[in-house]
Image: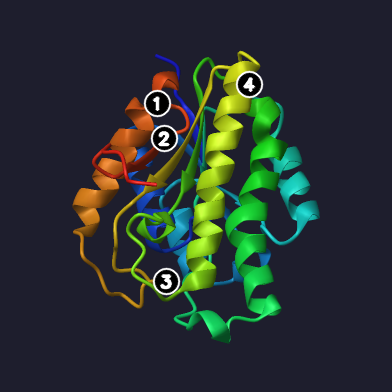
Amino acid sequence: MEQKTALVIGANRGIGIRVARELLQRKWNVVATVRPTSQDDESVKELASTGASILQLDYTDGRSIIQAVKEYGTGPLDVLINNGAIGPKHLAWDEHTSEILTELFQINVIGPLLASKAFYPNLRLSPNGKIVNITSGSASIARNNGMNMGYRMSKTALNQMSVTMAKEILSNDDNITVIALYPGHLATRMSNFSSSNDMETSITGVVDVIENVNIEQTGSYLNWEGKTVPW
């Protein structure tokens, strides 16, 4: 059986490095990206020790995305995991500024869109390509309990992007599945190491979903258990 390849964007810490490790344990070929400014971090050395190939990519720099594609090459890509993000600012709605909102949308929405566009030719070479956009429970309008407006807006926009991409790709008869995947509330630097879910259980579930999701589920908003999350 031919080895499959996953590209994990934002993989040197938190959810990203754990997903990369789990994929490697399941015998995937893993290409992991880090921001150029993180190149000398200990976390990058830890990532390199897993056996993943490493590329530099910054969601805020379109040139770095194009360069990452060039370095990846022209071969097939089975799964693109848009994991890079910045977290909640913990601000009231009227404390948000245009600068804060611009940064959130650039990294949490525009970056994943540009990366998906750039790697799309590689995904089309896979018999069952997948784009997995790592989202948040905060993206759910039905479950909104206030606060973190800018972050919520950006993740809801990521979900909208996922559904729109899924429908257009399906109408073009490209066999590429697109989902928004909520990994749970996990103890990472982004969450200030608070959590509601067990890290190991959630990461195992995330990779199970990545491996098993199919074109019939394209456009879905799923959690780590494969269950549908209310929009």
Say which element carries label 1.
helix
Q: Disc 3 residue type?
A: Met
Say which element carries label 3.
loop
Give 183 or 169, whichever is nearer the viewer: 169
The disc at residue 217 is: 1
Sequence-first tag of 4 and 1: 4
Label 3 – label 4 distance at C-alpha: 32 Å
Label 4 – label 2 distance at C-alpha: 20 Å
Sequence-first tag of 3 and 2: 3
- According to the image, label 2 marks what residue? 220
Above or below 180: residue 121 = above
Q: Nearer the viewer, mark 3 or mark 2?
A: 2
User: Mark 4: few, some, or many residues within 10 Å (few <14, many ≥20)?
Assistant: some
Q: Relative to 117, is 208 on the left or the right?
A: left
- According to the image, label 4 marks what residue? 124
Label 3 – label 2 distance at C-alpha: 24 Å
Say which element carries label 2.
loop
Above or below 139: residue 114 = above
